[in-house]
Image: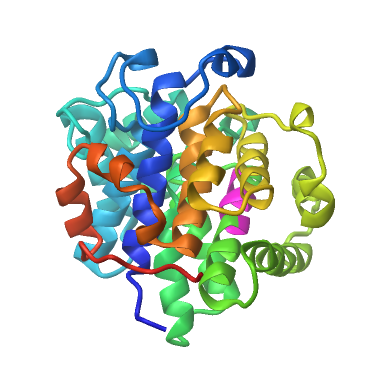
Amino acid sequence: MTKTNIWQNGIMGVVVGDALGCPVQFESRAEVAAHPVTGMRGYGTFHLPEGSWTDDSSLTLALLESIRRKDGIDLDDIMENFMKWLYDGEFTPYGRSYDIGQGTRQAIDRYASRRDAKKCGGADEWNNGNGSLMRIMPACLYCSEMMSRGEFSDKDAIETIHAVGSLTHAHIRANIACGLYFFMVDAVLTGEGSLNDRLQAGLARGFAFYDSYLADKENLHCYDRLRDLAAFSAVPADRIRSTGYVVDALEAAVWSLVTTDLFDQALLKAVNLGDDTDTVGAIAGGLAGLYYGYAAIPEDWLNAIKRRDWMESLCGGPDPSPGIV
């Protein structure tokens, strides 16, 4: 197999999913159904041109830039980048931050005043939004690479993922979502079979890890519908929620992937669920990008992405990377 740029595949998948969902963010499913998303378009929720992306991509790119520059995970450096995004408009399409989650803003403000990266993320029940999951892809790719070199165990990887997620969302339920996402990322990259086979293998490994790792399984049970993807794929759309709650967002993204067979089908299904469209699109897009590859992303979608050359340079591209298929 041709060597693939996994960073470009995964990150550009996140960004494209975010940009597809941006114009209809916060619209209900019925509202979106009245004018369904069929490709890149502009204006809508934030009145921005097509190919504009939101905080999901900004924070993903801020994390990516830190990991690539530091050649590792430096929590303080990541938070410095997050401050540059929030206060100075770096890592954005237009030099200003927007679409800022409350939990993320509060965590960055706490870091700015206390400079303690390990204690800035909120840890109560209200900190189970999807703000850590939406940006976790670069940390997942880093941990997967470390595992491939034999330098990380599953425990090392998950503790790293939890630390990065906890910068803004430190509740264990949000941590678990990020951890399950990591196991899916690693399985897509290293497993065999179809996308559904790989996602199922990753989730099985993830649930086995957390069943052993956690003394209290209450928060893990929130994700029980993802234990059997064959059964989950048969769940009707009206039982899939696509809100900003981290469990809903992860379920909606995975459901969109396991009920489709192509990159564009998966992302369009994700964003047409309505509600937190940009984030569900970003979460689904990252995994779809890794499996189907950069070359599977419609060229007109990529051409619309603002600051595309800059973000591809962060990924070590451009490179017409194939995916797994």
Q: Quadrant of the N terminus?
A: bottom left
Q: Quadrant of residue 22?
A: top left
Left or right: where 11 falls relative to 276:
left
For this view, does 99 lie left or right of residue 129? Answer: left
**Vertical relation: 95 (above or below) 137:** above
- Magenta segment range? 174-180
Kindly give the residue lying farthest to the right in the view shown. Answer: 231
Tell me if residue 29 can be seen. yes
Q: Residue placed at 28% from the left, 27% from the top?
A: 50
Instruction: Inspect the magenta stretch and tell me whether residue 178 lies in it.
Output: yes
Residue 318 placement, left or right of 30: left
Q: Residue at the location (23% across, 45% down)?
A: 80
Q: Residue at x 74, y 62 (%)?
A: 207
Viewer-nearest residue: 165 or 302: 302
Q: Is residue 17 above or below residue 271?
A: below
The secondary structure making up most of the magenta span is helix
Q: Which of the two residues, 54 or 101, is positioned nearer the viewer here?
A: 54
Q: Position of residue 212 (x, y in %)?
A: 77, 68
Is residue 311 highlighted in magenta?
no
Locate residue 64: give its quadrant.
bottom left
- The answer to whether one can see residue 122 in this image is no
Residue 67 position within the rendered picture, expressed as x and y whole percent measured from the top left: 29, 61
Instruction: Examine the image and state in which quarter residue 113 appears.
Output: top left
| Residue 237, percent from left and from top | 74, 31
